[in-house]
Amino acid sequence: RDIPLSEIDAEALPRDRASRDTEAMAELRHSILRDGLRQPIELFPIDGARPYGLISGHRRLAAFRALGRDTIPAFLRTPANLPEALAAMVAENEVRAQISPWEKARLILTCLAEGQFETPDAAIDALFPAQSRQKRSRLRGHLMVAECFDGRLATPERLSQARLDRLAAALRGGWEELLLDALPDPASHSLETQWTALTPVIAEALSPRA
């Protein structure tokens, strides 16, 4: 169906992407102008001023708004509840473009804060059911990192899985206060300069004698 953009709440669900590539957005707008929308967005009915919540297609919807369109082609889904809608969003984004480890952890924290799930394990089970036991354990560590460093890192979505693993190991060892003391302000430092400042503390935390 063609749905009016004014009837769509793009933030009805916590989003799992922390960054937006301006160059990719420009390419998407050009593609829509040239070929039209190849894949409709996905919506679900909600109660509110806008009757539809967005499941997938955040970038496509933003592109249509930037182009001044009035309506957008959409599939209407009927998830049983909000957690099911969240799971559908994550599944679609995992197929289209890999969600970063930080974004996965941050999404879970947001869902927990909003009361969508009672425990981290319940959130992981619902949102990432295909992950192995080892990957779920690793994600629990990433949750610790996101909870500790949220708002303190510049572009944290660029942190590699290996770096998140090292931070998680240091936090498990009780080094949170020293890590935070060593961390420069994200307003005046890049992620790389912040990581350089953290590296000696992490090395000490993970050394055999620590």
Image (cartoon, rainbow, N blue to C red):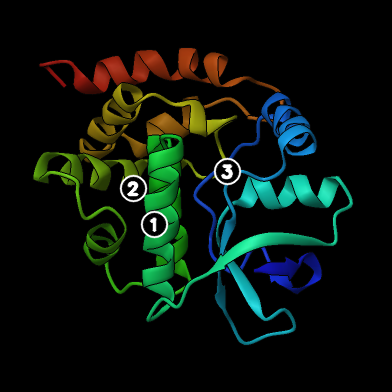
Q: Name the residue: 75% across, 44% down.
A: 63
Secondary structure of the residue carrying tag 1 is: helix
Q: Quadrant of the C terminus?
A: top left
Based on the displayed image, in which of its 4 quarters is residue 32 positioned? top right
Whether residues under marks 2 and 1 lie with C-beta atoms below 8 angstroms apart, the answer is yes
Secondary structure of the residue carrying tag 3 is: loop
Horizontal placement of 70 versus 111: left or right?
A: right
Based on the displayed image, in which of its 4 quarters is residue 49 positioned? bottom right
Q: How far apart in space, not on screen, are marks 2 and 1 (Cα)?
A: 8 Å
Neighbor class of circle 3 (other Cα within 10 Å; few <14, some 14-19, many 20+) is few
Q: Which residue is mark 2?
A: 143
Whether residues under marks 3 and 2 lie with C-beta atoms below 8 angstroms apart, the answer is no
User: Which comes sooner in the sequence, label 3 or label 1?
Assistant: 1
Q: Which residue is mark 3?
A: 151
The x, y position of residue 198, in whole percent, is: 43, 20
Circle nearer the viewer, 3 or 1: 1
